[in-house]
Amino acid sequence: MFMIRLVIGFSALLWTHTSEEDSTKSFNRLYPILNEYIREFPRELRNIPEERRYRLNEIVYFLAEQYTGNNNGQVLFITTNEATVGQMASAWSKAAAYYFGFRNFQAYTGGLKPEKITENTIISLEKAGFIVYKSTTGGMDQYRIKYSYNLDPLVSFPKKLDHSRNPSANYMAVVLDKNADMNINDIRGTYNRLFLDYEDPAGYQGAFVETAKYDETCRRIAIEMFYVFSQLKKRLENS
């Protein structure tokens, strides 16, 4: 019954579950807890302010152009320290892209002065329904983040903007904090740059509301990434 309610609720926003490569493919299943977490998203999308939608639509337009031109969609999320919101944005964008059938979408992160990913970042993602495995390679903590069955995980670790794993062309740079936006002049390989500011919950370290702020930021990013890919799917279907 829950799955029926979910599909009916999402269908009102054309949230169908087929691949852009083959419209006959089956529903892209997220893990059950993730499906429960996103259940109210169709209602919450309506609360995104108009100015914020305008910014998010810049990502939609870029990705639509890439997919229309038979390119894979690529977004590089840029922050100052790589410890919090960039990791959340990459995880949620991958989950949302997969949910709406964009299996070839690639999300990357880069920072000015990478720091260790905070424990609360991982905890917030796990509470939402991601499954995260931690490992250490070369003295560096890495996280393998999974959101669905039988898929390769997203491998997350703090790295600089110009890291070799990040794209060098055909990507959109999305800057997620004011300090990074003010201190980065040119971003190699792209003319597509967007400032999409989020409050960094790391600023609440030690405060009574620290955990709540991480969870609040995690949910806001999730809703906005699902908005992007729901609108992308509708735009491509109507083109």
Image (spheres, rainbow, N blue to C red):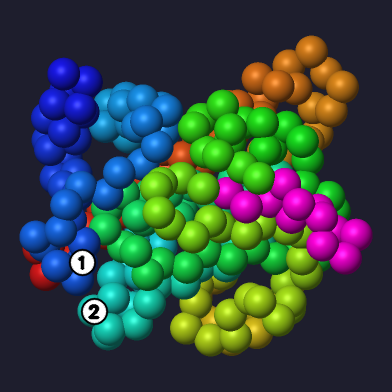
Task: Please name the amino acid that badge 1 sits on.
Answer: Glu
Can you say whether 76 is above or below 96 in the image?
below
Q: Can residue 101 be seen in this view?
A: yes
Observer-nearest of 220 and 90: 90
Q: Where is residue 118 in the image (x, y as percent from the top left)?
A: 78, 40
Quarter assignment of residue 234: bottom left
Looking at this rendering, what residue extends furthest in the top direction? 208
The residue beneath circle 1 is 20
In this image, 175 relative to 206: left or right? left
How many angstroms separate mark 2 from mark 1 (CA)?
11 Å
Disc 2 is placed on an element classified as: helix
Would you call the spot at circle 1 few (<14 residues within 10 Å), some (14-19), or many (20 or more)? some
- Prevailing secondary structure of the magenta residues: strand
Q: Residue furthest right?
A: 139
Query: Identity of the amino acid at label 2?
Result: Thr
Number of other residues with Cα within 10 Å of mark 2, as a class: few under 14, some 14 to 19, many 20 or more: few
The residue lying at 56 percent from left, 27 percent from top is: 127
